[in-house]
Structures are given as C-alpha cells and as structure tokens.
Image (tube, rainbow, N blue to C red):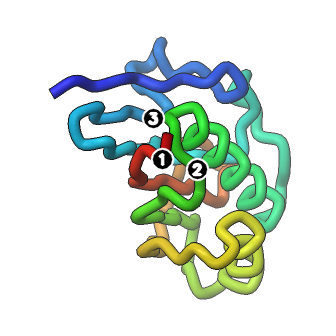
Amino acid sequence: MSIEMINPEHLYDGTPVGLSQATVDTDTGLIFVSGQVDWDSNSRRLHDGIAEQTDAALANLVIALEAAGSGVKGVLQLRIYVRGEVADHLPSIAPLLPKYFGEHRPALTGIGVASLAEPDLLIEIEATAKVLR
C-alpha cells in the first residue's frame, strides 16, 4: 500500500505535530481528510459564531479534498463534531451543507463533544472520500 500525504499551503501545516491534512491510499483511491476547523494557515481562528466557523471549516475541507484529487462529489462520509448538543446547532449548520454539497448527499454523522483543539472552536468536520481525478 502506498500512502500520499497532503498538506495544502492554504491550510495550517500539521507536520510539526505529526499529522497531514489528508492522506490518500493510492492503491484504493480512498482519501481520509483530517478534521477541518475555522483556522487560517497560521492556526488562527477567524470567527466566533457557529455558522461562520462551519462555513470556514467546509471551505477548508474543500481545499483539502481538491489537493487530494477529489471534491465534494467524491465525499463518501462526513463527520461533524460540534461542541455541545448537535441539535442545538443544527439550525446554523444544516443550511450550509447544500451550499457546499449541492445535490450530493454523503453519509453523515453528527457528534456532540466536550472539547475540540482549542476552547473557542465550536465545530470540526472530517471526511472520507474517493479520488475523482
């Protein structure tokens, strides 16, 4: 098995802490995207609200997918980690999914968590996808 590590320059570089933004199993064409959050390339949070953080995390997800040779149509499964109760945030999160995924409907799991990478992060989104190139 051959694994390609993906670290797009527009996302923060996880190399110093031992992670890649995505990995591609080049034998199967499967892509595993690390949890994307509302961080710029310097690991700085940009927004306070859940809707804005969701939008930024989804935009970062698209960057990682495209760098790995895929896109939103290649997403097989999406996992959304939300600080607190998922149901409390659905009105802010749900309208953004069609903005990015259109008619594509990947398998989706929403998970409420007590914490994320930093105290002010409210959402983290990871995906499993397939190569489309």
The disc label shown at residue 31, or none: none
- Neighbour tally class for label 3: few under 14, some 14-19, many 20 plus, Cα within 10 Å: many
27 horizontally vs 99: left or right: left
Sequence-first disc among 3 and 1: 3
Mark 2 or 3, nearer chain start: 3
Q: Are marks 2 and 3 in contact (CB under 8 Å)?
A: no
At 74% from the left and 85% from the top, the residue drawn is 91
Task: Read off the residue under disc 3.
Answer: 22
Mark 2 and mark 1 lie on one chain; the one further toward the N terminus is 2
Residue 34 image position (x, y, % from top left): 46, 42
Is residue 59 found left or right of 36 in the rendered image?
A: right
Q: Which residue occupies the extreme left position in the image?
A: 1
Residue at 66% x, 59% y: name it: 122
Give the vertical position of 68 relative to 106 (above or below): above
Choose between 3 and 55: the one closer to the eye: 3
Q: Residue at x 58, y 19 (%)?
A: 13
**Residue 111 vertical position relative to residue 34 in the rendered view, above or below:** below
User: What whole-number distance in Å separates the C-alpha atoms at marks 3 and 1?
Assistant: 15 Å
Q: Nearer the viewer, mark 3 or mark 1?
A: 1
Q: Which residue is mark 1?
A: 132
Tag 2 and tag 1, C-beta contact below 8 Å: yes
Q: Amino acid at mark 1?
A: Leu
Q: CA distance from mark 2 to mark 1?
A: 7 Å
Amino acid at the residue labelled 3: Ala
Q: Secondary structure at mark 2?
A: loop
Q: What residue is shown with label 2?
A: 71
Task: Give the residue at the far front of this rendering.
Answer: 133
Would you call the spot at circle 1 few (<14 residues within 10 Å), some (14-19), or many (20 or more)?
Answer: some
Percent coordinates x, y for residue 125 in the rendering? 55, 56
